Amino acid sequence: MAILVFAENIDGIYKKSSFEAVSYAAATATTTGDKVIAASLGTVEGGRLEELARYGADKIVNAADKKLDTFNPQSYASVISQIAKQENVTIVVLPNTYSGKSLAPRLAVKLNAGLVSGVISLPEISSGFKVKKTVFSGKAFADVEIKTQVKILSLTSNSYSPKELNKAAEIAEFSPSFNDADFTCQSVEVKRVSGKIPLTEAELVVSGGRGMKGPENWAMLEELATVLGAATACSKPVSDMHWRPHSEHVGQTGITIKPNLYIACGISGAIQHLAGVSSSKVIVAINKDPDAPFFKAADYGIVGDIFEVVPKLVIAAKNLKSSQH
Amino acid sequence: MKILVCISNVPDTTTKITFTDNNTKFNSAGVQFIINPYDELALTKALELVEKHQGTVTVINVGLADTEPNIRKALAIGANDAIRINAQPTDAYFVAGQIAEAVKAENYDLIFTGRESIDYNSGQVCGMLAEMLNLPSVNVINTLDIENSVATMERDIDGGREVVKCNLPLVVSAQKELAEPRIPNMRGIMAARTKPLKIMEPTSVTNSTEIAFYELPQPKAGCKMIDAEKAEELITILHNEAKVI
């Protein structure tokens, strides 16, 4: 039996979330006794395939067809299901990225598999097969049992740290068969903001709320984020007022994130906002109102004027970073 | 153009979540249920499309009779008719399977779901339904224009946006910027009372997953306060004590 991992790449470079998924599969395999097979779709840069072995793959199936250089949920689901069937796979692990999210449900139907999206823990297999996921947009967790023979898990970013296992993996080339109907949808253009850390994968996040008073004041948050190597985020009112793009909105109707550090500047901490960030490892709240609900959900707090506090943090962070070099 | 919008009944965003029966069931006592916000945006977009291109908008929900107030609300917002599949939704596979069976002969040009439901956050119905109906799918779309049966959309991807073109028929899932929600007016509310609501019994499709139990997050041990005058100490603490930077 085998665990198959979808190792997603962007322009030929694997994402960190792919290494997390490979290491997660390797950890699962230590209890199930399965072999870990990583599926790589499309052309990857030379030498990169071996990275998958470093993080725990026993075998790498390389479907380096040019047709797969552009992500397409239909063709990807089809190719991954072909590999899964060939390799006698009982568990499929995918990163819960936008690509993973669009592909996993199709794969579940193709493989008659139960799917849990947004998994945050290793499976519990002592009685049945259960995994934990966040529900109610972060307000709670559910332990979900998968009842089908084939099981699919999509793993939340930052839920499992990649571990270097340095396995020696066999690389097998794979020639998929294609169906024209799988290419009905065509990607016309990909617009990625270069040099910015995607919020969904960021380990550190600096976030601003209404207390920031206006979009023109974001420069100091962006500076703090740049110094720390963090992504920027915002609360719902901020994106509703178009101070910041919707893609930065974290909370119940925005995105749910799980970074190591979340710094909330001028965000009061409404229940809907806390839902989206409460899984963060360390939370810092900075607010001039000592009664702001965010302090109850935070690990560290500063009661003060963000326009005085944040510049101090920027200086201190710069000093820390320069002392590290 | 014939459009289907799948709507889910979810707890209002302000709900404090609790559980009953040894944490195996969601406690719905006193909870206000709403149309899943992303599904409501999908509905508004569907109405904008038929206003421009002609056509009809049908809403479909898998749920017991207690979801009917929200189905009527969707009709009041402007949907032409509605279908309710009379079953407790157990997981996305079950819901997608029920909807696929109910609509497979209807040849909708466009089927909408929300990006995800705000209760179980799986975002699976769009892709499952598309696969079951053998249709293409594009998820998490922020824009949608249709010309000569070709849809052009912008979808969220990690770290950016992607422009995708696809021939109809098609299944899509709505993200936040797709539309602004509409508030039903009195005329809509009156009209909704007499709009057709068809109730269908579920087919034999079953669920593939089951929630064993729920947990609430552990409360934080307490917030360590740092003097604003010495705010720079936070950076030292995050580095030396919390070890996150």
Image: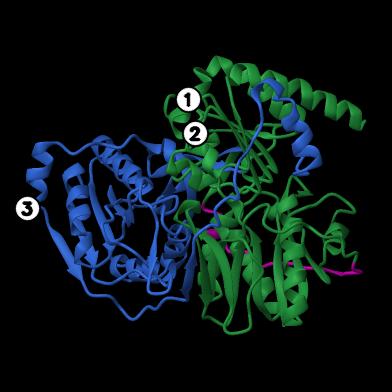
Chain colours: A green, B blue
- Residue A39 in sight here: no
CA gap between label 1 and label 3 equals 43 Å
Kindly check if marks 3 and 2 are in contact, taking CB atoms under 8 A apart as contact: no
Which residue is under mark 2?
A235
Q: Say which amino acid is labelled 3.
A: Thr
In the rendered image, residue B91, in percent from the top left (x then y), is placed at: 42, 69
Is B88 drawn above or below residue A213 in the view shown?
below
Mark 1 on the same chain as mark 3: no
Query: Mark 3 against mark 2, which lies toward the viewer?
Result: 2
Disc 1: which chain?
Answer: A
> Which residue shows up at 84% across the image and 29% down it?
A320
SS for callout 1: helix
Which residue is under mark 3?
B194
Which of pointers 2 and 1 lies earlier in the amino acid sequence? 1
User: Is A291 or A210 nearer to us in this picture?
Assistant: A291
Q: Is residue B23 left or right of residue A301?
A: left
Q: Is residue A61 left or right of residue A88?
A: right
Which residue is under mark 1?
A210
